[in-house]
Amino acid sequence: MERSSPFLLLATIFSALYCHASSIEHGGLPLPIHPIRPKSGSGGKLLEGISCNSWRLAVETNNLRNWKTVPAECGDYVGHYLLGQYYRQDSSYVTLEAAKYGESINRTGDGKDIWVFDIDETTLSNAPYYAAHGFGVQPYNETSFNAWVDTGKAPALPESLVLYNRLLSLGFKVVFLTGRGEMRREVTRKNLRAAGYRNWEKLLLRQPSDVHKPAVVFKSEQRAKLVKQGYRIQGNIGDQWSDILGTDIGSRTFKLPDPVYYVS
Amino acid sequence: MERSSPFLLLATIFSALYCHASSIEHGGLPLPIHPIRPKSGSGGKLLEGISCNSWRLAVETNNLRNWKTVPAECGDYVGHYLLGQYYRQDSSYVTLEAAKYGESINRTGDGKDIWVFDIDETTLSNAPYYAAHGFGVQPYNETSFNAWVDTGKAPALPESLVLYNRLLSLGFKVVFLTGRGEMRREVTRKNLRAAGYRNWEKLLLRQPSDVHKPAVVFKSEQRAKLVKQGYRIQGNIGDQWSDILGTDIGSRTFKLPDPVYYVS
């Protein structure tokens, strides 16, 4: 029962949000019970102070780097965002654009046109974990996060699953490239399959020699190997800038939202 | 009188927004009379439809590229954003972070530590023009935009002026690098001075041979020349991704918001 408590909490939060919201319609969309509002400490001057909207935009545009935790004032804001409609809409806009791009390019049919997907907060969602651990306000706890990963119960990010299926149907091969360690290959494989991802060309995880490399270095090295093997990286999607910066980034990159954590 | 009409319109819009808003306080900040609301056509599926919030995030994160005009449904939204508090807050967050970064790095004092500023929508604001021309919903009109530029009356983006002054006081030299043509050097010089920018190391404009180059190519070439001349590009700030992608981008880049137009 201990282990299921994050799920119970999440179910409670979801039902509180959606059961109430579904009775209130606005422009065809359910309204969350708590609209996301900026919490602001200052206006337009160079003063300290937090506007959570501006903080999130700065995060998503890579203006803010190497941050360790979500500002405490923005915990509720991030929670409402992550569990509400805006995260889904923002993700949908990105994956729609990615699908359009995939449709627009010539595929050769030789099996070498690939699309690189990051895993956490891209292919799979750890929202259930973060809902139970302060939405990024608490410092990263490797032990408890890994315990969650090892349950293998992360749901798909629904928009990414739609994109994944569309790309497969267009003839792309998918490569999963993740900062997770090799020791988590089996649980990751099972989790991907359980979440609806059943075909991939490669599942690339960190080897022991990669452990101390920044993600941007590790992922650039792995993409270089793919290119050397004759693959054409037509698309590359991730929630972190370290997924889509560096070298051999692919013909086009897509940045999914992630206001919960930063990986360099 | 014809030429001053954009200013009159802008003054009217500003006073309508702020005079009314100043009587309503919320959390210490004035509320705009029309809060920015997402206008949405679809939920989380791969369907056509516009959420203006999601559209703007996709633009600012470089997920959406080569777009020609703001979607018609988002014209009002962009207008309220650009003339309201959120554009200022978002800009402030970026320039605050840039100033912090500037303070954190060692300056050698040899006059070679430079900061590259783009001009339009970075150093100067064309909000008065766009307020009179549909906030990006209307297709770009080179003739009328250039007529506005030639008035030399663009105000400073206030947050950038604060950053500029802070960087000068820290010992950086500033280089302005703009897609404007050489024929506009004099009006640009006067406009910069009138807006409060009085010192610069270089003002780099497009030469006739640069006219057909994409901005990202032209700007990369100019930065390469700066590096060759021994300058160290410590910072680079612009409102377009083409200002801060390419080569010799600088030790760190900063992306200011611009939901009005896209330059490749």
Image (cartoon, coloured by chain):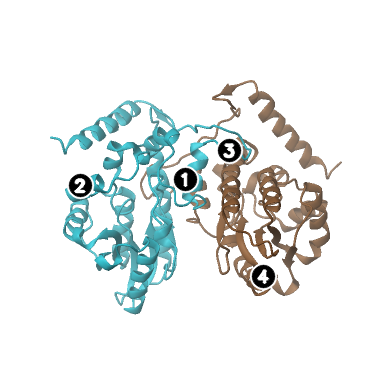
Chain colours: A cyan, B brown
Q: Amino acid at mark 2?
A: Ala
Left or right for B97, reference B1: left
Q: Position of residue A233 (x, y in %)?
A: 38, 70
> At numbered mark 2, what does the secondary structure look like: helix, strand or loop?
helix
> At numbered mark 4, what does the secondary structure look like: helix, strand or loop?
helix
Marks 2 and 3 in Cβ contact (< 8 Å) = no
Residue at mark 1 to residue at mark 4: CA–CA distance: 37 Å
> At numbered mark 1, what does the secondary structure look like: helix, strand or loop?
helix
Q: Earlier in the sequence, mark 1 or mark 4?
A: 1
Image mark for residue B86: 3
Marks 3 and 4 in Cβ contact (< 8 Å) = no
Residue at mark 2 to residue at mark 3: CA–CA distance: 40 Å
Residue at mark 1 to residue at mark 3: CA–CA distance: 15 Å
How would you rate the neighbour count of disc 2 (Cα within 10 Å): few for under 14, some for 14-19, many for 20 or more?
few
Residue B35 placement: quadrant: top right
Residue at mark 2 to residue at mark 4: CA–CA distance: 51 Å
Q: Amino acid at mark 3?
A: Tyr
Nearest-to-viewer mark from 3 and 4:
4
Image mark for residue B226: 4
Q: Chain of mark 4?
A: B
Nearest-to-viewer mark from 2 and 3:
2
Image quarter of the N terminus of chain B: top right
Q: Chain of mark 1?
A: B
Nearest-to-viewer mark from 2 and 1:
2
Residue at mark 3 to residue at mark 4: CA–CA distance: 34 Å
Q: Amino acid at mark 4?
A: Leu
User: In this rendering, do the residues under marks 2 and 3 share a single chain?
Assistant: no
Q: Which residue is mark 2?
A: A147
> At numbered mark 3, what does the secondary structure look like: helix, strand or loop?
helix
> Between residues A137 and A219, which one lies in front from this camera angle?
A137
Nearest-to-viewer mark from 1 and 3:
3
User: In this rendering, do the residues under marks 2 and 1 share a single chain?
Assistant: no
